[in-house]
């Protein structure tokens, strides 16, 4: 008898096989499609590099590439220093009110970028609330968000949480004695941050820098909304516009662009993984977490407070207040008085429109039931690799990273093709299942981090104790590990719910009667210019996420791993 | 009869060999300690026996059953070995009550509920935990947690019980009580136990036999008395007690005795091992064998007292011979000055 019997290996093999199929099938389909000269269902298709030749000859493509690169670089340069500084202030100083500031800092990462972007348009666009008020009060509004610079600044500010999360985790692992040493040597708090704390967490900053950079290449909602008026394209919006560009479905061209995007992001994801190993090494060297003492800020307190307040104002309050206001006014522009324009009409319009109501219902369904099933699947994958250090575990480790490199828009497109390409799946094409599957795969890496951080909190000895009194691996998982991580899993369910409420780009190509979700409807309504409905629906979306956030805070769910 | 037999066990982590051919036996009703410094492979050996580490060579038998044999491709998973394992951290399941923790092994063996309750109650009573069945592990003291861990490992009557550093998580005072309790319990129940420890006093107090591991091999094994009073190697001699150690050259050997000498000193001792004349040698003597004398004599050196330390039940005197510190116990304080210190030849081992 071997240590592993078939009864044990079979479920594991099945889990890994299903995961691999769900991740690799859509991706292979994109690769395959990009090497054809016409859509894969076209009888006249030929294998070749025509699609690549076409897009490389298109000056719009290069323009879009340039914009993507500029925005990604710019937002990294903004988000990394700010996120690092924010983490230092929040983790290491005696700034008052940190407990309630912390969830505020994470808000931008839970609000749909589509909603945020729309919020910026109605708040700070040429006829936005704040633009007009500023003109009335100061005689001018010196900003233009419909520009590459404007988009870069907004993207940079809204991606600060991505850096903050990693930087603060690294700071938690750093003993405070090194900072105290710098203080006794005569350094001011911000000097300490700049010369001691932040350099020591350099690997984490580098890691999050790479993350923000490739997220920059994946931006979709922001350039779609803000780039449109001036015709500024980035790679993802270029791909999106290709749908209409030639009149006929140009799947092969879209696939070729998709491959170009993945060709940028995938190496970055791998690089990030390497860096993560580096941060772990670093953390274990400096791992004397020990006692944490806060750095007294004294007069610097107000500067820190002002800085954080300004950031919250610009990246949370401005866009969200814009959305909230716009949802309740009939129209807005120069010379409109707020009190005269107030209305509830937009919500009534949504109430009267069955597709809208279905979209809201579907969004909740995908978040609650779908989120639950997703956590079940992620947990199964987690158990398939838990405490097993073999080739299969390493394979799954890499496998879950793959979707990270594929922006939601592309993943949605790829799943659309999968559902069209494999006849047995076609009946599910216009069911919520297609959206759920695409969401689950797109957020695989994020979800697996949540699950494995829960699993890692269970000490190996608790499981070994189960084995030694006579429980099989499966029995240990069921009787010991699962009960021990149940709160972690509930928390993951809540986080996945919020992520699924927020998601929009993945559902864009899957939008069909029966699969409406708010995110995709926002994109399509925005394209159709239905600003009133977008505003109301955005607000509903924010409320849904807010409910999740409220529950999470009420029960003390950690909003980050 | 051997309850546990390990033959030529080799195990490595990656390319790093941890066990390099370990063989041992554990007889019925016997307590054997695996003793050694950290990194010597003692815990790994225990875990390999439990089935939690996979050796790449060798065999493990529990009673008549082969649970691991690399050549025959036999590898029984941990859950099929029917051993009791007590973890260093106790590893009590925090979501189960004491009763549920202990009963789990019986549940897995499909023991009827009524009988299971009876057996759990019995074992808890035996361990002095009678009233604590309803509690959760975090509501217990360290000592009580340890007993629950033992109860959990004993309840299904395993042939062999394995204990990984069972005392190291208790504070010093409690440790001595727990040591006595554990020894008494093992003897009373007639258990066959394999205990990992890094503390030689613990090993000597608790076990019938000690296996001293060094760098993945068994350095020496024997009863506590043999190990303490008859070390065969320098490593064993140094590990088992508090010693003075002389480094010098072997000057001559005669009738099983050897003379070791260094700069300005020369001492007779018992020859251990086979160093040739003129080669480097070490003299080792337990602190309690060193005597402070008033006059010159055989195997006495004239040494200056450096300082004395009061230990409560005795004094420890620190002498110096050049750079070499030499220590001795005494019953009274010594005033500063020079003394003749005797290192009795029959108690001094030369390696």
Image (cartoon, grey):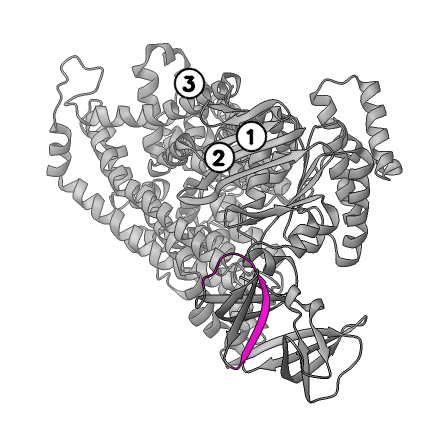
Q: Is residue A312 magenta?
A: no
Is residue B273 inside the magenta stretch? yes
Find numbered disc 2 in the image and state the secondary structure of the residue it sits on: loop
Image position, residue A372 (x, y; %): 56, 27
Q: Is residue A56 above or below residue B289?
A: above
Q: Start and end of the magenta stretch?
A: B264-276
Q: Are marks 2 and 1 in contact (CB under 8 Å)?
A: yes
B185 relative to A190, above or below: above
The image quarter in which residue A479 lies: top right
Q: Position of residue A371 (x, y in %)?
A: 53, 29
Residue A452 screen position, x and y as percent: 52, 38
- Residue A95 visible? The answer is no
Callout 1 and callout 3 share a chain: no
| Chain letter of the residue carrying label 2 | B
Question: Where does label 3 land, which residue?
Answer: A513
Q: For numbered disc 3, what is the local secondary structure?
A: loop
The location of residue A370, given as percent across then percent down, is: 52, 25
What subunit carries mark 3?
A: A
Question: Toward the viewer: A140 or B253?
Answer: B253
Secondary-structure class at tag 1: strand
**Chain bearing mark 1:** B
Q: Residue at x 55, y 52 (%)?
A: A104
Whether labels 3 and 2 belong to a single chain: the reply is no
Residue B55 image label: 2
In this rendering, do the residues under marks 2 and 1 share a single chain? yes
Residue B66: which quarter of the image? Answer: top right
Rounded to the nearest whole Å, what is the CA distance between mark 3 and mark 2?
59 Å
- Between the C-alphas of marks 1 and 3, the distance is 65 Å
Tell me if I can see residue A206 in this picture: yes
**Residue of label 1:** B60
């Amino acid at each position: 008898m071997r240590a592993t019997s078939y009864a044990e290996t079979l479920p594991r093999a099945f889990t890994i096989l299903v995961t691999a199929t769900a991740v690799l099938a859509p991706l292979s389909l994109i690769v395959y499609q990009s090497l054809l000269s016409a859509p894969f269902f076209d009888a006249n298709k030929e294998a070749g590099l025509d699609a690549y030749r076409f897009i490389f000859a298109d000056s719009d493509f290069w323009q879009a590439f340039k914009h993507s690169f500029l925005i990604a670089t710019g937002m990294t340069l903004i988000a990394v220093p700010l996120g690092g500084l924010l983490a230092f202030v929040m983790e290491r100083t005696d700034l008052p009110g940190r407990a309630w500031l912390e969830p505020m800092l994470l808000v931008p990462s839970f609000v749909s970028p589509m909603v945020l972007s729309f919020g910026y348009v109605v708040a700070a666009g040429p006829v936005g609330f704040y633009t007009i008020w500023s003109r009335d009060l100061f005689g001018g509004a010196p900003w233009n968000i419909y520009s590459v610079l404007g988009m870069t600044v907004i993207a940079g500010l809204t991606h600060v949480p991505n850096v903050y999360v990693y930087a603060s985790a690294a700071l938690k692992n750093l003993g405070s004695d090194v900072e105290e040493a710098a203080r006794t040597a005569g350094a001011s708090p911000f000097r300490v941050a700049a010369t001691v704390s932040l350099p020591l967490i350099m690997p984490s900053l580098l890691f999050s820098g790479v993350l923000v950079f490739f997220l920059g290449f994946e931006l979709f909602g922001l350039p779609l909304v803000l780039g449109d008026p001036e015709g500024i394209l980035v790679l993802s919006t270029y791909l999106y516009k290709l749908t209409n560009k030639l009149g006929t479905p140009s799947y092969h061209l879209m696939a070729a662009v998709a491959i170009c995007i993945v060709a940028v992001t995938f190496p970055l994801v791998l690089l990030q993984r390497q860096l993560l190993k580096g941060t772990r090494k670093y953390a274990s060297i400096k791992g004397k977490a020990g006692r944490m003492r806060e750095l007294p800020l004294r007069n610097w307190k107000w500067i820190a407070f002002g800085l954080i307040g300004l950031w919250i104002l610009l990246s949370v309050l401005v866009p969200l207040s814009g959305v909230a206001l716009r949802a309740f006014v009939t129209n807005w522009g120069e010379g409109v008085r707020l009190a005269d324009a107030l209305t509830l009409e937009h919500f009534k319009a949504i109430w009267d429109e069955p597709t809208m109501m279905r979209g809201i219902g579907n969004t909740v369904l995908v978040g609650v039931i779908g989120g639950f099933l997703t956590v079940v699947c992620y947990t199964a994958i987690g158990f398939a690799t838990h405490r097993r250090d073999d080739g299969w575990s390493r394979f799954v480790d890499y496998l879950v990273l793959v979707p990270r490199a594929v922006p939601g828009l592309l993943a949605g497109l790829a799943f659309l093709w999968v559902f069209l390409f494999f006849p047995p799946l076609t009946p599910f094409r216009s069911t919520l299942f297609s959206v759920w599957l695409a969401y689950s795969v797109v957020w695989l890496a994020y979800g697996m981090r949540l699950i494995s951080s829960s699993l890692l909190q269970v000490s190996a000895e608790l499981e070994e104790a189960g084995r030694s009194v006579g429980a099989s691996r499966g029995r240990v998982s069921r009787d010991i590990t699962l009960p021990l991580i149940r709160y972690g899993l509930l928390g993951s369910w809540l986080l996945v719910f919020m992520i699924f409420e927020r998601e929009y780009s993945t559902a864009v190509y899957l939008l069909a009667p029966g699969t409406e979700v708010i995110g995709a409807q926002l994109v399509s309504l925005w394209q159709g210019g239905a600003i009133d409905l977008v505003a109301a629906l955005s607000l509903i979306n924010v409320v849904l996420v807010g409910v999740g956030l409220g529950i999470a805070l009420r029960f003390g769910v950690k909003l980050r791993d | 009869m051997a309850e546990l037999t390990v033959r030529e066990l080799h195990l490595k982590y990656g390319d790093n060999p941890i066990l390099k051919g370990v063989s041992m036996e554990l007889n019925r009703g016997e307590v054997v300690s695996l003793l050694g410094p950290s990194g010597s492979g003692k815990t790994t050996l225990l875990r390999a026996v439990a089935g939690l580490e996979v050796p790449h060579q060798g065999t493990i038998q529990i009673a008549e059953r082969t649970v691991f044999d690399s050549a025959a491709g036999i590898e029984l998973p941990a859950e099929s070995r029917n051993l009791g394992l007590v973890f260093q951290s106790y590893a009590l399941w925090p979501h189960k009550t004491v009763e549920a923790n202990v009963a789990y092994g019986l549940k897995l063996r499909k023991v009827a509920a009524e009988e299971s309750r009876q057996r759990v109650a019995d074992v808890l009573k035996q361990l002095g935990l009678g009233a604590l069945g309803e509690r959760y592990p975090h509501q217990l003291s360290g000592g009580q947690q340890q007993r629950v861990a033992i109860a959990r490992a004993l309840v299904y009557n395993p042939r062999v019980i394995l204990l990984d550093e069972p005392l190291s998580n208790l504070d010093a005072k409690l440790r001595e009580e727990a040591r006595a309790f554990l020894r008494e319990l093992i003897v009373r129940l007639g258990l066959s136990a394999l205990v990992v420890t890094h503390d030689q006093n613990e090993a000597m107090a608790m076990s019938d036999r000690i296996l001293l591991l060094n760098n993945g091999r068994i350095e020496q094994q024997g009863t506590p008395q043999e190990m303490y009073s008859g070390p065969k190697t320098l490593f064993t001699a140094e590990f088992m007690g508090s010693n003075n150690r002389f480094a010098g050259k072997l000057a001559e050997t005669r009738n099983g005795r050897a003379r070791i000498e260094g700069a300005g000193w020369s001492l007779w001792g018992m020859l251990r091992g086979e160093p040739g004349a003129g080669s480097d040698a070490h003299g080792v003597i337990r602190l309690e064998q060193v005597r402070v004398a008033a006059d010159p004599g055989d195997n006495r050196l004239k040494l200056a007292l450096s300082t004395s330390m009061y230990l409560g039940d005795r004094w420890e005197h620190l002498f110096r011979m050049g750079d070499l510190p030499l220590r001795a116990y005494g019953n009274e304080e010594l005033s500063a000055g020079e003394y003749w210190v005797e290192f009795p030849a029959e108690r001094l081992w030369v390696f």
